[in-house]
Amino acid sequence: MTKTPSLCLAFVIILFSVTSLAQDRGSLTLGYGFAVLSENSNIGKIEEGNYDFVQLSYIFEKPLTEKLAFLVEPFAAYVNRPHSGVEGGIVLSGKYYFREKQRNGFYLTLGGGGAYTSINFEEQGTHGLFILQGGIGFKWKEFFIENRLRHYSNGGTAQPNKSINSNIIVVGMDF
């Protein structure tokens, strides 16, 4: 068995075991992301050129208190540039709602996780990446919009280890 199918099988097993614990609420999201705050680069660009992608995710939300929740978010993305490819991973986050009433209004998210990318980023030296992610959003009834900042890094497991940062604009709907 090669390394990629083994990693995919491990990812699926972990995904289903973690998400089965967090199935109180679910949201389907669609997002568009592009590079920001990368070293020596302009908005939309990394050292290799433009970087942008479209992402789908499903968020499992487990309320902890009236204002706090735990999120499990598996995602898959189609990378448009610098080369066509795919990314997939999972992010575990905390969510803070500023209002208690029906959880409408502004909220913050902060979390981390891991991802696999088929893109050969020269700045990373590996296809397995760690994620740090934070966002601010607004929810009204079952709909929401969120702006996120995602930081990709190999965590020092390979060289070079320059960051790949992206802004992701996400729209979604609770089910």
Image (cartoon, rainbow, N blue to C red):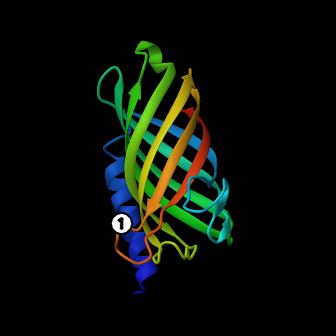
Name of the residue lying farthest toward the top:
101
**Residue closest to the eye, 155 or 172:** 155
Q: Determine whether the residue tagged by mark 1 lies in a helix, strand or loop.
A: loop
Dot 1 amino acid type? Gly
Quadrant of the rendered structure where residue 48 is? Answer: bottom right
Up the image or down, 101 lies above or below 137; here it is above
Quadrant of the rendered structure where residue 138 is? Answer: top right
Name of the residue lying farthest toward the front:
40
**Could you tell me residue 35's position as x and y percent?**
61, 56
Left/right placement of residue 32 relative to residue 70 reads right
Dot 1 surroundings within 10 Å: few (below 14), some, or many (20 or more)?
some
**Could you tell me residue 160's position as x and y percent?**
44, 76
- Residue, x 43% and y 36% (percent of image)? 109
Left/right placement of residue 174 relative to residue 5 reads right
Quadrant of the rendered structure where residue 24 is? Answer: top left
**Residue closest to the eye, 78 or 15:** 78
**Could you tell me residue 104's position as x and y percent?**
51, 19
- Residue, x 57% and y 38% (percent of image)? 147
- Residue, x 43% and y 16% (percent of image)? 99
**Residue closest to the eye, 170 or 18:** 170
Q: Which residue is mark 1?
A: 155
Left/right placement of residue 108 relative to residue 138 reads left
